[in-house]
Amino acid sequence: MSVARNGSNGERGGRPGRTQEERSAAMRQRLLDATIECLVEYGYSGTTTTKVADRAGVTRGAQVHHFPTKTDLVVSAIRHLAAKRTELAFGELERLRSSADPVGDALDLLWEMHQGPVFSATVELWVAARTDPELRRHMSVVEPIATSSLVEFGKALLPDYAEHPEFLHAVYTAMDVVRGILIASWATRDQAELDARWARGSKHLRILFDALMYRAGHTPS
């Protein structure tokens, strides 16, 4: 059954009673969510603004109004979801602070945050940026912002560790381990192997962070 395109502000079948600002925000949200879904399903090269608009249920003109180009659309989607991922992490801050093993729980949280479509879509953009100068320019801005947010979370959770000058590099190493394991796992799709690799990786990361605590003059938990 076709959907009537009679919604206001470019929405297909838009609901009445909302303000212009609310409709605009809802449309942007649908476009960003649809972009991630398309990146995961079709890859970067197969993702088009037309496919995104169709999946989001908005007109092509409305999509162009909010995000003039494909690059604007995909980079905004990643920026938005990176911010949401950071927000979720900080939402766990108090719980982890009271944990008997904050380092282990923080590593597991980092692992969990890289599961699902957000990371898959991000990898699509990393690969595409290798040969797309415009996308690479945008990603070079977005990536440091997303990474620095996770570093700030680590400092807030583990202030004693953060005193060590190598703390920043340890966080980067943890992210590299998580991302490397997940990307390599796509070749086999073997969950048991994936779990075993993370168990091994997190064990060695824990040794790294414990070493920082010893050097900072603290006793790790």
Image (cartoon, helix red, strand yellow):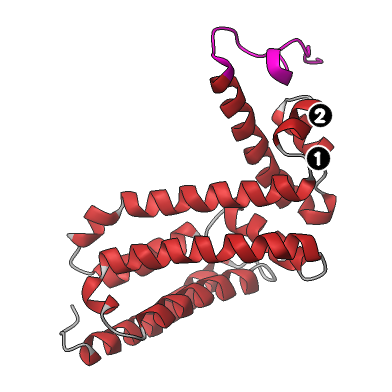
Instruction: Using the image, determine if residue 13 lies above or below residue 195.
Output: above
Inter-mark Cα distance, 1 to 2? 8 Å
List the residue tagged with mark 1. Answer: 49
Dominant secondary structure of the residues highlighted in magenta in the image: loop
Residue at the (60%, 68%) spot, across then down: 190
Badge 1 amino acid: Thr
The quadrant in which the N terminus is found is: top right
Question: Which residue lies most toward the bottom here?
Answer: 215
| Secondary structure of the residue carrying numbered label 1 | helix
In the picture, measured across the screen, residue 80 lies left or right of residue 94, that is right
Question: Which residue lies most toward the top here?
Answer: 17
Residue 53: image x %, image y %?
Answer: 77, 32
List the residue tagged with mark 2. Answer: 60
Q: Nearer the viewer, residue 30 or 8?
A: 8
Residue 33: image x %, image y %?
Answer: 63, 39
Residue 49: image x %, image y %?
Answer: 81, 40
Quick check: marks 1 and 2 in contact, CB under 8 Å?
A: yes
Residue at the (64%, 66%) spot, across then down: 140
Picture quarter containing residue 105?
bottom left
Q: Is residue 97 visible?
A: yes
Picture quarter containing residue 35?
top right
How busy is the neighbourhood of tag 1: few (under 14 within 10 Å), some, or many (20 plus)? many
Span highlighted in magenta in the image:
1-20
Badge 2 amino acid: Arg
Residue at the (49%, 66%) spot, across then down: 147
Q: Is residue 196 visible?
A: no
Residue 165: image x %, image y %?
Answer: 33, 85
| Secondary structure of the residue carrying numbered label 2 | helix
Picture quarter containing residue 134?
bottom right
Q: Is residue 15 magenta?
A: yes
